[in-house]
Amino acid sequence: MDISVFERLQKEELIDSDSLDAIKAREKDKPVSVHWDLRTLVYFSILLFTTGLGILLYKNIDTIGHATLVTLAGILAAVCLGYCFKVSPAYTPLQSASPNLWFDYILLLGCLLMLAFVGYLQYQYHVFGMQWGLATFIPMLFLFYCAYFFDHKGVLSMAITNLGAWMGIAVAPLKLARAFDSSNENIIVNGVILGGLLHVLSWLSGRFNIKAHFASVYANFGVHVLFISLIAAMFRFHEWYFIWFVVLGAVAAFRMLSAIANGSFYFLVCSVLYGYFGVSFVVVDLLFKMRNSGELVVYFMMMYFMGSAIGLVFLLIHFNRQLKKNDRIQ
């Protein structure tokens, strides 16, 4: 509750001092919600549990045995997922609530154990032979199914990550940027395809109202993958970089308009920053072609980066104010 609103009302004599004091006392003594704090701790506990279990098994593999490990992971995954299928309500294309407090965490644990189970089978027993792509493709399909059936954004993120792995791409933005070797054309092309596909899935989710709240998850992954892929393409295909720059500009403009329409400052910032990287690449390339002009090029480059950085900050502040004015910022 914003107390300053009531203070202004009191100054305008719309409420009396006693009412203001009562509101302040109520606000001061009201209980504080720890809902999201507890949920975050439970999520971290699941991640720590699966990580610790993996380390324990790795260090004691010789004494425990491969068959025991595979069986244990399979049984635990089956128990968790079996419970989720048992208590979960019927599928609906709309957003649905979890049947109980522990459902989301048990589902997340079951999916993580399932991934470990399939990965271990392939690594140790080569159940898919030399078709290593199947070790990511089959779990990917199952994760997408679980994400939609149980309405879980966390599992959807895991499915998208597996989709990227199947295509040979690390979907995490930092790993994605590090993995893009400018000489690897296949990764760059696959990144553009994956980023475009995720944008299409985001649009389809909202257009046909099939788990429409998943659109932001697809868009979040798609924005980073597509923009980083396009920037990498500008470096790799330098002779044709202007074509990739036009595509980058078109995508940035589309994402900016979409972000403004949906009131999302996060996607607006992403679009502006990636677009700025693309423009800076073109400017620097043009200045390097003029390097025969001597120190003048260096001065122009310094002026560009200082001026553009200031302009970028003011632009973001302007958009932020506009979104707040419309009361639609997310």
Image (cartoon, helix red, strand yellow):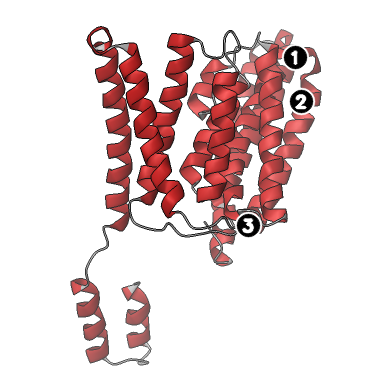
Q: Which mark is residue 237?
A: 1
**CA–CA distance in space, label 2 to label 1:** 9 Å
| Number of residues whose C-alpha sits closer than 10 Å to that of mark 1, classed few (under 14), some (14–19) or many (20 or more) | some
Q: Are marks 2 and 1 in contact (CB under 8 Å)?
A: yes
Q: Relative to 170, does residue 256 appear above or below in the rendering?
A: below
The residue wearing badge 2 is 244
Q: Nearer the viewer, residue 104 or 245?
A: 104
| Number of residues whose C-alpha sits closer than 10 Å to that of mark 2, classed few (under 14), some (14–19) or many (20 or more) | many
Of the numbered discs 3 and 1, the one sitting upstream in the chain is 1
In which quadrant of the rendered image does the N terminus lie? Answer: bottom left
Of the numbered discs 2 and 1, the one sitting upstream in the chain is 1
The residue wearing badge 3 is 262
The spot of residue 311 in percent (x, y) is 60, 42
The spot of residue 29 in percent (x, y) is 18, 73
Q: Secondary structure at mark 1?
A: loop
Amino acid carrying mark 3 in the image: Asn
Q: Nearer the viewer, residue 328 or 324?
A: 328
The spot of residue 188 in percent (x, y) is 67, 19
